Structures are given as structure tokens and as C-alpha cells.
Amino acid sequence: MREDIRTEEDIKQLVHTFYDKVRADDRLSVIFNEVIKDNWDSHLQTMCDFWSTLLLYSGRYRNDPMSKHKVLPVDSAHFGKWIELFQETIDELFSGEAADAAKKRAANIARVMQTVIGVTK
């Protein structure tokens, strides 16, 4: 039986597994690799901090994620694939309240981000 997201190690597993999928995806890898280049270790740590703050209330992430995404050439299909891979990763690894909360938060983040950066299609 899969456990819920409870520890920093769980966050690390979620983030690293998810971004392995992103890097293998034809649609998303182009954008992520172009922006992140050779800084994947730093990006993964930032994403661990982000999700740790949202799910474990660690307070480690204090940046503005919207400003980083405003300049990216993305459309609704990119966000759809991002959500699909994120939820798929959670469902493969975890089960429980925090896992469900992570999926809901990711969907909300995607909706807000699309509105803020003006993605319609």
C-alpha cells in the first residue's frame, strides 16, 4: 500500500520522479531544458523547497513563482501535460490526504498561472 506524503524524503522522491518525466516528455522537455540548461540540480532543490513549503509547511520557499513563468512560451497544452504528469507521479508513489492536497494545489497553481500569464489556448 502506498503511503502519504509526510517527509522531506517523500517530497524529494515526488519532485525528482516528476521532473524525470518532464525531461522525457517531448512537449515539456524543450521548454524546461532551454530555461534550466545545466542548472537542474539547483532547479530540483528549488522545487523541493517549493513543495515542502506547500505540503509540509517548512517555509523554505520564499520566491515568486509567477514572475519566472511570465516569459515562457507556453500554452494550455503545456499546462495540461504538466498537470497530467504531476498527478500521474503522485498516484504512482503516494496515497492519502497530503497526496490529494498536492494534486489539488498543483491544479490550482496551473489555473492561476495560466490566468496571470495570459494563456488561453
Image (cartoon, helix red, strand yellow):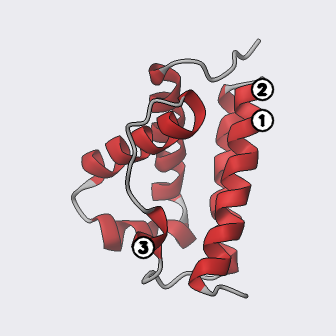
Mark 2 and mark 3 lie on one chain; the one further toward the N terminus is 3
* Residue 83 x/y as whole percent: 69, 57
Q: Residues within 10 Å of mark 1 (few under 14, many from 20)?
A: some
Q: Residue at x 47, y 46 (%)?
A: 20
| Pointer 2 with pointer 1, Cβ within 8 A | yes
Q: Which residue is mark 3?
A: 67
Indicate the secondary structure of the residue bearing disc 2.
helix
Q: Which residue is disc 2 drawn over? A: 97
- Give the percent coordinates (x, y) of residue 38: 21, 59
Kind of residue at disc 3: Ser
10 Å neighbourhood of mark 2: few (<14), some, or many (≥20)?
few
Whether residue 87 is situated above or below residue 112 in the rendered picture: above
Residue sitting farthest toward the top: 1
- Left or right side of 109 for 65: left
Q: Which residue is mark 1?
A: 100
Horizontal and vertical percent position of residue 72: 45, 81
- Which residue occupies 77% across, 11% down? 1
